[in-house]
């Protein structure tokens, strides 16, 4: 996917309402997961990304700092993000658990 024409989100846009459900693209530009939910706001927050699985079953939630993700809107207004992490690297992260 060519992200060059997509508009990057400002730090003030990094909120749960905007980011939840966003597709995450990895270093190889393949889909690596979706944002399930967000802890905190702005650059100091963290996205909980569901990685792997099929149709939402068997996905592993991992926590990634929002600063590791470049969120943007495409020409349709849909939010997505690009990260330097690969799907395998994300799968190797510790599973995020709710406390």
Image (tube, rainbow, N blue to C red):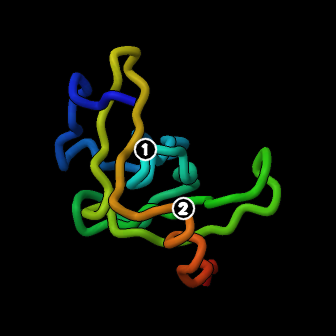
SS for callout 2: helix
Is residue 17 placed above or below 6 in the rendered structure?
A: below
Tell me which label, 1 or 2, sits earlier in the chain.
1
The residue most toward the front is 28
Q: CA distance from mark 1 to mark 2?
A: 10 Å
Is residue 76 placed above or below 57 in the rendered structure?
A: above
The residue most toward the top is 76
Indicate the quadrant containing the C terminus: top left, top right, bottom left or bottom right: bottom right
Residue drawn at point x = 55 percent, y = 53 percent: 32
What's the mark number on residue 83? Answer: none
Give the camera-side residue of 37 and 78: 78
What's the mark number on residue 29? Answer: 1
Q: Residues within 10 Å of mark 2 (few under 14, many from 20)?
A: some
Left or right, residue 79 beside residue 35: left
What's the mark number on residue 87? Answer: 2
Residue drawn at point x = 68 percent, y = 59 percent: 52
Q: Residues within 10 Å of mark 1 (few under 14, many from 20)?
A: some
Could you say which quadrant of the image residue 62 lies in? bottom right
Could you say which quadrant of the image residue 57 lies in? bottom right
Give the camera-side residue of 38 and 35: 35
Is residue 90 placed above or below 83 in the rendered structure?
A: below
Q: Where does the image place residue 22, in percent across and percent down from the top left?
A: 49, 41
Residue drawn at point x = 34 percent, y = 69 percent: 65
């Amino acid at each position: 996917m060519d992200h060059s024409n997509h508009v990057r989100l400002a730090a003030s846009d990094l909120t749960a309402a905007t980011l939840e459900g966003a597709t995450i693209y990895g270093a190889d530009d393949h889909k690596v997961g979706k944002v399930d939910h967000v802890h905190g706001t702005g650059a100091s927050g963290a996205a909980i990304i569901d990685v792997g699985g099929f149709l939402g079953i068997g996905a592993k939630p991992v926590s990634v700092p929002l600063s590791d993700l470049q969120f943007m809107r495409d020409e349709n207004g849909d939010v997505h993000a690009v990260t330097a992490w690969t799907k395998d690297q994300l799968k190797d992260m510790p599973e995020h658990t709710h406390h």
